[in-house]
Image (spheres, helix red, strand yellow):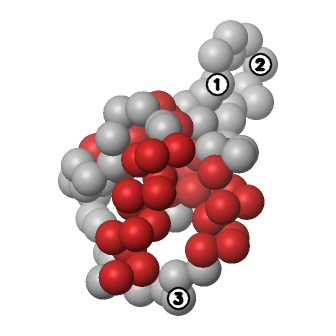
Amino acid sequence: MRLLTHNMLSSNIKGVTNGFPLRIEVEKVIEKEVDFNIDFLRNMFAKIEWKALAEASRTMGYSELPDAESSMTLMSFFASSTSA
């Protein structure tokens, strides 16, 4: 499952008071390269719950995302991602 998809999911089970974020239990991580689409990411950032994304990212073994979202952090991230 993609982490962006995970960030949009919540539990609808009756009686659950806080169904977001869903907990991830990792058995195996498979990385799949996709084309970098900066316009898609710019549109998605408005919808993302950043803290949940950062926590899920660390659960998957990636520590690059900062704990808090900031426009400067995003600019730095985009700059480093596009130069790679």
Among numbered discs 1 and 2, the one appearing first in the sequence = 2
Q: Between marks 1 and 2, how big is the CA–CA gap?
A: 10 Å
- Label 1 vs label 3: CA separation? 31 Å
Res 77 seen here: yes
- The mark nearer the N terminus, 2 or 3, is 2
Q: Residues within 10 Å of mark 1 (few under 14, many from 20)?
A: some
Residue 26 appears in the rendering? no
Q: Position of residue 22 (x, y in %)?
A: 53, 35
Mark 2 nearby-residue class (10 Å; few <14, some 14–19, many ≥20): few
- Of the two numbered discs 1 and 3 in the rendering, the one whose residue sits closer to the viewer: 3
* Front in this rendered view, residue 64 or 19: 64
Which residue lies under the disc numbered 1? 19
Judge depth for marks 2 and 3 and give the one in front: 3
Comparing 62 with 71, the one in front is 71
Q: CA distance from mark 2 to mark 3?
A: 39 Å
Residue 54 location (% of width, % of height): 39, 41
Q: Please tell me the numbered disc located at residue 35.
A: 3
Residue 55 at x, y = what percent? 37, 37
Q: What residue sits 36% from the left and 33% below the top?
A: 67
Q: Which residue is mark 2?
A: 14
Q: Is residue 21 above or below residue 71?
A: above
Amino acid type, label 1:
Gly
The image shows residue 64, relative to residue 40, as above or below, that is above
Element under disc 3: loop
The amino acid type, in three-letter code, at marker 3 is Asp
Classify residue 27 as left or right of residue 12: left
Say which quarter of the image contains residue 14: top right
The residue depicted at 23 percent of the width and 49 percent of the height is 63
| Figure quadrant of the C terminus | bottom left
- Residue nearest the observer in this picture, 6 or 37: 37
Q: Residue at the location (42% across, 80% down)?
A: 82
